[in-house]
Amino acid sequence: MGGQACVFYGAAEFSRDTDFAILADGANLARLRKALAELQAEPIAVPPLAIQFLRRGHAIHFRCQHPEALRMRVDVMSKMRGVDSFAKLWKRRTTLQIPGGAECDLLALPDLVQAKKTQRDKDWPMIRRLVEAHYFENQRKPRPAQIRFWTQELRTPELLVELVQRYPEICRRHIGKRPLLVHAEAGNTDSLEQALLAEEAYERQQDKKYWLPLRQELERLRHTK
């Protein structure tokens, strides 16, 4: 669900860690603990690996000591801001076969984009590249669901203007959900750029509010430890 997934979707990013969205139940945590033991993974800081922390939205971090994954960091989460439950994410997942025959399950692209809407500077250029790559790959014969996705998530002013010109009726139906499409309809890229920045600022602020109580809980756990 992190940088590794972005690589698979064509928006290359160098990543020193691997992020997983996991099902937070007892049986699955037992499987996870076994996998972490095989990786000789050691916990980093707090919180500890426990269902209650995963269900509240904390990320739990590990550092691998196995020679074949030395120093690789593994982060696991079960709940993310604005992202559906794990059961729904799993139904929508994208499954790829990688060299050697192994299968790799990724967050569906719309879910990955939503999960990337954080307060971190590096995530917003990545969202833009992810949606751009998807647009260029599918623009010739797009499905209605893909057009809706672009309408809601494209962050490139010129492409948004192009999209509205190609599919005016579809885009007009989504203006209520994304008012900045009005600027795209008018072909005003300067106003559209400012509206995109305001949209990003709002999402960043919402992410800060979401994480505030979680950060406060982490501080209490650090002091207790």
Image (cartoon, rainbow, N blue to C red):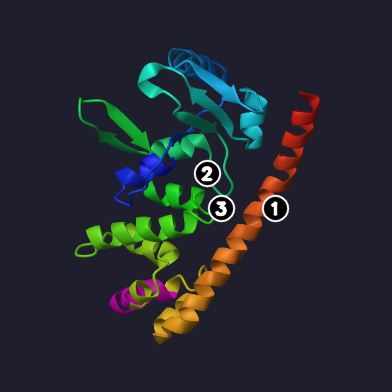
Q: Is residue 156 left or right of residue 87?
A: left
Three-letter amino acid code at disc 1?
Lys
Residue 169 magenta: yes
Main SS category, magenta section: helix
Residue assigned mark 1: 209
**Element on which disc 3 rests:** loop
| Inter-mark Cα distance, 1 to 3 | 11 Å
In the rendered image, residue 8, in percent from the top left (x then y), is placed at 30, 43
| Residue 222 drawn at (x, y percent) | 75, 30
Q: Quadrant of residue 151?
A: bottom left
Query: Which one is nearer the viewer's eye here, 172 or 12?
Result: 12
Q: Is residue 179 visible?
A: no
Q: Position of residue 14 (x, y in %)?
A: 37, 44
Magenta residues, as a range?
A: 162-172
Q: Name which residue lies at 24% across and 32% down.
A: 98
Is residue 222 visible in this depiction of the protein?
A: yes
Q: Earlier in the sequence, mark 1 or mark 3?
A: 3
Give the x, y percent position of residue 139: 24, 64
- Which residue: 43% across, 85% down? 188
Number of the front mark, 1 or 2: 1
Mark toward the start of the polypeptide (1 vs 2): 2
Query: Does 144 sit above or below residue 39?
Result: below
Question: CA gap, disc 3 to disc 2?
Answer: 16 Å
What residue is disc 3 on?
A: 118
Identify which amino acid the numbered label 3 is placed on: Thr
Q: Which residue is mark 2?
A: 84
Amino acid bearing label 2: Asp
* Whether residue 174 is situated above or below residue 129 in the rendered picture: below
Check disc 1: other Cα within 10 Å, few if <14, some if 14-19, many if 20+: few
The residue carrying pointer 2 sits among few (fewer than 14), some (14 to 19) or many (20 or more) residues within 10 Å by Cα, namely: some
